[in-house]
Amino acid sequence: MSTKGTPDDPKGLIYEAYRIEGITKPQCRAIFFDWVLSVETDRDSRARLRTLLEEHGQDGAHPMTEVMTEGLHGIATPHRRGGWRSRKRD
């Protein structure tokens, strides 16, 4: 089992969320959002989430497992959209 402060969870946010008794899904979403903002962008976020789910997500009924699973499916590869060069000219 993982400990607090790993490369995939530098602040230990996910680790601690699983230890909060009675935590709700909205609270897990807020923690997840903070986690997203705190991780380095040098590694694929999906890979980080898969690792964290393997470490912590054995209890599928925990709201953080549900939030991370939703995040895993909702993270898109960033790409540039729009801009002045993409406008069609008449």
Image (tube, rainbow, N blue to C red):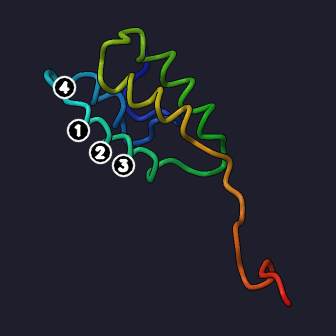
Quarter of the image where the N terminus is located: top left
Under mark 4, the amino acid is Ile
Q: Using the numbered discs, state the Cα–Cα distance from disc 4 to disc 3 in whole angstroms.
A: 16 Å
Residue 68, position in %: x, y? 44, 30
Mark 3 touching mark 1, by CB under 8 A?
no
Residue located at (43% from left, 20% from top):
2
- Say whether disc 4 or disc 3 marks the residue closer to the N-terminus: 4
Residue 62, position in %: x, y? 30, 18
Mark 3 touching mark 2, by CB under 8 A?
yes
Q: Closer to the observer: label 3 or label 2? A: 2
Q: Is residue 70 left or right of residue 66?
A: right
Q: Using the numbered discs, state the Cα–Cα distance from disc 4 to disc 1 in whole angstroms.
A: 10 Å
Q: Secondary structure at mark 1?
A: helix
Q: Secondary structure at mark 3?
A: helix
Mark 1 touching mark 2, by CB under 8 A?
yes
Residue with the mark numbered 1:
27
Residue 20, position in %: x, y? 19, 26
Residue with the mark numbered 3:
34
Q: Secondary structure at mark 4?
A: loop
